Amino acid sequence: MISKMDINLNWKSFLSLHDLIWEKTPNDYFNAPFIGNGLLGAMIYQPDGESLRMDIGRTDVVDHRDSEARSIVDNGRLPVGHFTFETNGNLQKLTGRLSLYDAETILTAGYSLCREGCGRNIEFSFSVLRGTDAFLVDYRMPEEMQGQWMFHPEASVVYRNPIEGRRHLNPVPELSVSDGLNLCVQKRDAGGCYVTAWKIVKTADGKTRLLCTIQDSYPDFAAVDKAKELIRLLESEGEVDRQIHQHRAWWNDFYQRSFVSVPHKKMESVYWIQQYKFASMMRKNGPLCDLMGPWYKQTGWPGIWWNLNTQMLYSSLHISNQLELASTLPDYLIKMNHELIAAVPEKWQYNSAGVSRCTGPAMQESILTWPSAESPERSNLTYLCYYLWEYYRTNMDENYLRNHLFPLLKRSVNLILHEVTTDENGIIHTPLGHCPESSDDPDNNYDLSSLMWGCQTLLKINKQLKLKDPLEKRWQEVVENLLPFPSDENGYRSSVNKSAPLMHRHWCHLFQFYPYYVVNREQPENWDVILNSIKYWGSPKIPNTWTQSVISSMYSSIGDGEKALEHLNLALASPNFFPNTFHAEGRNPCSETYGGLCRMLQDMLIQSWGGKIRIFPAVPNEWKDAVFLNLRAEGGFEVSAKRENGKTMWIRIKNNAGEPCIVVPGFESEFIIKGGKLTKSEPGVVKLAIKKGEEAFLFTEMQNENPVLQPVKGTEEYNFYGLK
């Protein structure tokens, strides 16, 4: 340590300011409290005129069929069911809060034996234990109250129409009771089953407790015994107490990987609620998160989307230093390497791989038959590799780079290299392909930008690892001779023959400058086309949360904090963004938005591309104060910084990998460097030599060597989300 940092931060108190609060009864999936442990999840609400209910789900409960329906149907998500709390009276006015710090929802309901008014209150505590796959509901009933949790299994069917035939309905669930243990066994015709097991027990302090689990197995029926064993284990109150302690300790520690605070308290709340949501949706060695995570809802999108959604969902985790959660994507792709290869035509499987627009978790789909064999989405895997590259650059795991990312990126680029052509002038062209939600055309900017970024990155890796790959010359030819990105007076076109779409949610025709940064603000010759592109495409009228977050990030990428803030506010005001911070289109849950919202804020506070770390590159003028701790930058650096009264006050950089460090610090006056060695300085840029495992501290004369880290103040209301 080169100096002492005074961390004046009470995590419990800080996060409580961002808890979701219910002053009115949640009555719908999109305003309900939600709990999850990375595999199991529940939504708690009371539909108007109905009983209190708890919808339960498990991310890996899917069908396992192999028909002509496509894998999004054959291997799509299946519903489990929901509990209702049935009483001899009425529950009225459900209020409470979701505690982010302890990952627990506390709800209080008025209870009466008549409809005229509430007599007494009953308090419920809901959680999904982090250390074991069980729901826990504790409550204390008044003496005159009779209450029981009733389970309602859902029909076991994937709610998406297949290409051929009809939806497949699995057998009727089998319910049984043995020694007070309730079982609902749902068999699948394709094999295996998923099981809901639950039991009501009394605690030593007089409370009533619902214990519940969902277990899944395929192709066998081991889930039945697993469910029974877990509930029997949890009948021991000592075991539950141990699990609750472990659960809270895990969550309390989880948040402390990094810290962010800005004066825009609504955005600050969104950021921290999404951190809770990410950990509720993902966990190490768990299934890959799809569009809904563990919170099942009937949807036409019951799977994993690969032409934007997965990429955006995972776009912020490595920066927020949540590397364990971020690793779930590369872990999954390593496991599914064979399926990525099998997705391309057999003649190219020796050196290529790809991923279709959307699949079930088994990934049984051909890239070149969707959306059509004539005009496929060839660049989805390369686009996915961009975020795998960012993940690598923030942890610098050379083993992962050499043995997994490089071979996968190489295969993804080979897929399109098989079909490029070269004209009489030596210009390389991409074939007819689909630009998502835009057009079918050769030389579309989705394929051109992905191929350019892919070849540039392969050359970097090849040089770094001294591989002398035989395709090095071919990649260099592409970089030097690829058709320039088609553009016109409105900026970048969709393709060489088609103009950019207006009111278009997907920005694949603009990937060359965000997120790839192949074209960027440090290239004066490209300023006009970048600005024209954002102005033309980035309409404030697009009523979509994640689109507005991307427009904000684009403005951040060119250093325009005022425009970035404008679209940040539009993102949060979108009609598709609901009171519990869930996002949907047509009532279909869309998990990608949560990553886009967090990346939007991160892009204002820190950017690292092109070998430089940029501090507060797009903070708007009205944000006089801002602070972050231990955000990750490329090169494996952990970076902390403080802005006060509109000026950067200090920056702390820890070098975890021994990489060169180039910083754009944003200081307005002279600054002092402690630790590290200044190797070169030019206007606005500092080059530092910091030994691996050591830190450098940059600060102005107005700041002493021992900074204080604390949340910044804001004028807005806290606890904005929930139902007020």
Image (spheres, rainbow, N blue to C red):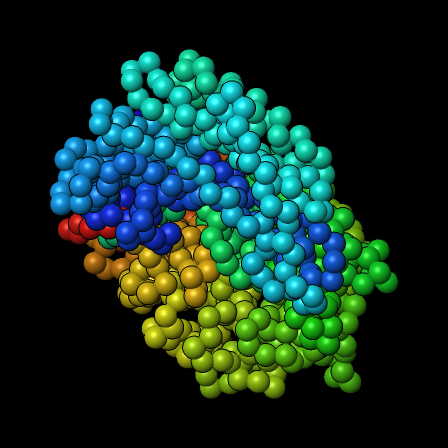
Q: Is residue 623 left or right of residue 218?
A: left
Q: Residue at x 62, y 26 (%)?
A: 225
Q: Is residue 657 visible?
A: no
Q: Nearer the viewer, residue 681 or 6?
A: 6
Image quadrant where residue 148 sits: top left
Tell me which residue sits at (64%, 47%) in the image.
171
569 and 654: which one is in front?
A: 569
> Residue 109: horizontal and vertical position, in percent?
23, 38
In the image shown, does 663 or 105 lie closer to the viewer?
105
Which one is in front, 129 or 715? 129
Residue at image location 33% in from the left, 24% down from the top:
208
* Residue at (50% x, 69% y) in the render: 506
Residue 509 higher or lower than 613, as above or below: below
Q: Position of residue 543 (x, y in %)?
A: 37, 70
- In which quadrant is the N terminus drawn? top left
Q: Image quadrant of residue 565?
A: bottom left
| Rendered view: 484 above or below 402 | below
> Which percent across, then down, holds residue 191?
71, 42
Taking the image as shown, residue 168 lies to the left or right of residue 587, namely: right
Residue 3 placement, left or right of 231: left
